[in-house]
Amino acid sequence: MRWSLAAVLVVLAWTHAPAAAQANEYGLSAVHAHADQTAVAVALRLHAGSQDDEDGREGTAWLLGRVLEAQAARALADLHSGAAVTVSVERATTLVTVLAFPEDWRNAWAAVDSVLFAADVDPVVTAGQRAALSDHLAFEAGSPVRDFETEAYGLLADPGSPFARPLRGTRATVANIGPDDLVRYREAHFRRALATQAVVGPLPPDTAAVLMPPDSAPPPASAAPLDSVVTHAAGLAWVTGDRRTQMQDVTSTWMAVAYPVPSDMPRTRLELIAHLLGEELDPTPPDPDRYSVGVRIEETPRGPVLVVEAAVFPEATARWEGRITNALRRLADEPVEEGFFRWRRRRFRTARLLEEAHPAAEAARMTADLLRDGAVRDLGLEIWGLDAAAVRETARALGEPRIFILGPDLGGSAS
Amino acid sequence: MTRFLSALLVATAALPGGAAAQMSPFAPDTLLRPSGGPRIVMLGTPGEGVAALRLAVPLREGPAEAGAGEILRDLAVHRMETLARPVGVRVSVSRTPWGVAYAVEGAAADFEYLAYLLREAVAEPNVTGPRFAEARLRLRAAAQQAMETPEGLLLRRLRAGAALGLPPLGGTPATADGLDARMVRSVWRRSHQSSTMTLVVSAPVVPEVVLAATRGLGAPEADARVPIDAPMLHRDGPDAETLRVYFGEAFWSAPVDDPHGPVAALLVARHLQGKGDGFELGAHLWELPDRWVLAVTGIAYPRRSSAMHAAVSAALSGTMATMDSEKVARAVAQLRREIMLRGQTAGGLVDVVGRAMEFGGDPMAMVHQLEALSAVDLTSARSYLSHLLEVGPVRAEVRP
């Protein structure tokens, strides 16, 4: 009796209505109210990333992110509110997240917004952050991990595409960047009208209407509409697969296997595939020949790509390459018993729930949803709606992989 | 059933504190006190679809039993992880100054399973298998390690001076050797009584479900009611070898829920930054069952030893002389942020509220601590540091 009662009471607890997207000065905004949350998370995703760096000044977006994060943290500290800010620069976007107490999140966000869009770029902070970045790049110079990263991103974009350039630039390009470059980058690429915003926390229902700080400037007339952000057409990022190897005198082998995904593929399905692949490739206990393995989804200029990266013992290179490609093939071809599928779906759902239990993580995901789809997903409903057939269908829809392997020459085992 | 339940329920209106305090996410929604069962504190649910439970078990060790709680923790972690992994539930077990806390976090739809994991966690430990021997070895290795490094030895001596005979939570190499299966089982039987436990819940379920899921927790009514009163085993071993001088002063103040302790520690730590001229300085804050201990330590080669001693001894007075309203306000803001960040998930919320409750048992403890923290200002911080200086420190040293 008691178990059935419990089942009835807790079932479908995650089936809240999806947060409706609203247009305002930030392009698109969405609010998700959690009455009992201890913090309010505000995330703003700007359509500006390292791919927008000027030639010869690669690293500008990254450095600007570090400088604005430091200046915004100082502004919040002056408020004594206890709020925290992070700025995360990616290739196509920049994500700004603020976590604040419910009673003063508006003040905290207004202070951060002011730094992002209006405050002077502090030359002293810029010099300090540039020196730190330069030291970091010097430390990493010659690292095979960075060589691998550069080549692996090259798989995902057209030759010469700015998308594949080093996210943080090089020591030479960073040395060219001054406060004026940061200001110029910000004026050219930080557009409220192209940004998406999400707020998660204990909020009243009318929060969306008052998201903008009152003293904010109106969006510039030249700002493009939000729907111009997603530039890739339906279809696959590439049609023909590829395989490249690079020999280097290193003690590990790094490999990237990238699958193009139809751009109209429902995102939750794709995330389930990534989760299942991750579990297949990295079970407990782990394979003794692997140092690390990860699966992620990349938004490239030509569409979404599912990327598997692994670092393995060099002698295990061929086996691991086969292990990755076979894992996906099995998902596409082998029927899965329904009960087994439901168990794996349950694990996927729990993992997503725990990940998004952090309001900042949920807000960040909501901004990505808004940018990509113009709407926020109702993850609970979508996950319950997945079935084994959808997994097979999704796996079959992926295109030919592009493979890149960097490792030592073991007499042909890596090639 | 309804009548039975209504007798147990304590409405939020009956909780102490004003309306604003009761609206705090750190304030309980519902308190339950089932006969013979754990005290149950139900909080709101910060995230949708997530459930978290934290079960605190008060545990006091006799001197000869020091480290038994740590062995119980070790055994429970293994048991819980084995069961949690297949469904992706997060589990943790922590030894606190007041006992052992078992926590689970997962999907609300798995609430029954989460409760089952807690029942397994506090069930009688298997003290006859190889896991027990491994846990005891780990305990001994950790205790030995702390004695073998000069810094570990200094901190241990300072703690012993400030804690007035309280056995170390991690035991000593000698107590670890003396902890046999019978003693650990005895500690479990004595401590893991359902009626002494406190369960903090954040889950979208009604109280009836929590009551049903938590019946039969822990040990049956035990005979032994007090810790074994045997003295702590001591064994002389070689002192840690060192080339440098390690010196420290430890100040204490009660009660442990006074937020001035962490504020003072933060101010002292910031004051010490950059003050080490040819030596190292550090600040440590320890939570004991009834008091804070603020320790300032220094490490120097013999030629800089005098300067290091002076810097350690001047740490609190120097902090007092240089602090201002701005520094105190920033320290308060940082501590508030840490509480907010820890409490932002269901798992973090039950941990923050449950841990605050372990001292004193007040379900509103976290709310009151936040209020008290917000009220800390320059005057009260000065007064607190003055009090520490008046009482005076315990000193310890490890020399080459």
Image (cartoon, coloured by chain):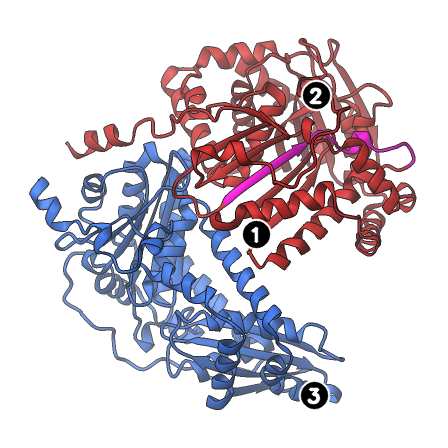
Q: Which mark is residue B85?
A: none
The magenta stretch spans residue A50: yes
Which chain is blue in the picture?
Answer: B
Looking at the figure, which quarter contains the N terminus of chain A? top left
CA distance for labels 2 and 1: 30 Å
For disc 1, the marked residue is: A83
Residue A84 picture location, percent across and down? 59, 51
Identify the residue under disc 3: B305
Q: Nearer the viewer, mark 3 or mark 2?
A: 2
Q: Quadrant of the C terminus of chain A?
A: top right
Cα–Cα gap, marks 3 and 2:
63 Å
Q: Which of the two residues, A381 or B84, is positioned nearer the viewer here?
A: A381
Q: Which mark is residue A229?
A: 2
Element under disc 3: helix
Q: Which chain is red?
A: A
The residue at 55%/56% (across/down) is: A81
Amino acid type, residue under disc 2 in the picture = Val
User: Viewer-nearest of labels 1 and 3?
Assistant: 1
The answer as to whether the residues below labels 1 and 3 share one chain is: no
Residue in view at x 12 percent, y 46 percent: B6
Q: Is residue A189 above or below residue B317?
A: above
Compared with residue A332, is residue A102 higher up or lower down, i.e. above or below? Answer: below
Q: Residues within 10 Å of mark 2 (few under 14, many from 20)?
A: some
Residue A140: image x %, image y %? Answer: 81, 46
First to last magenta residue range: A40-56
Marks 2 and 1, the one that precedes in the sequence: 1
Q: Does the magenta run of residues contain B328?
A: no
The residue under the point 49% across, 41% down is: A358
Horizontally, residue B245 falls left or right of residue A158, namely: left
For disc 2, the chain is A
Q: Dot 1: within a 10 Å radius of its alpha carbon, few (fewer than 14), some, or many (20 or more) residues?
A: many
